[in-house]
Image (cartoon, rainbow, N blue to C red):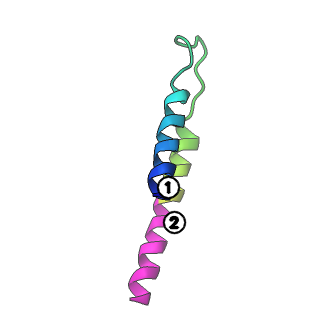
Amino acid sequence: MKKHILTLTFALLAVGLYAQPGNPSNPVPLDAGISILIAAGAAYGAKKVNDLRKRG
């Protein structure tokens, strides 16, 4: 039940991120930061999978 509530909360909070008005005249480049976060997440996931395979 906690998992469902947490998922619903994050889903509803994500909707608020799109509530910014209009198209900004000076957009912020997010490419480098997002790429680093994706790479870090993939590395962390690979480490967890590797740890689970070694343990089991």
Identified by mark 2, the residue type is Tyr
For the residue pair 12 and 36, the one nearer the viewer reads as 12
Question: Who's the residue at 58% across and 10% down the image?
Answer: 25
The tag on residue 44 is 2
Q: Amino acid at mark 1?
A: Ala
User: Upstream in the sequence, badge 1 or badge 2?
Assistant: 1
In the rendered image, which quarter contains the C terminus?
bottom left
Q: Secondary structure at mark 1?
A: helix
* Residue closest to the far bottom: 55
Residue bearing mark 1:
39
- 13 versus 2 height, above or below: above
Instruction: Bin the neighbour count of mark 2 within 10 Å (Cα to Cα): few under 14, some 14-19, many 20 and up.
Output: few
Q: Does residue 55 belong to the magenta stretch?
A: yes
Q: Quadrant of residue 19?
A: top right
Label 2 residue SS: helix
Viewer-side label of 1, 2? 2
User: Which residue is located at x 51 percent, y 46 percent?
Assistant: 35
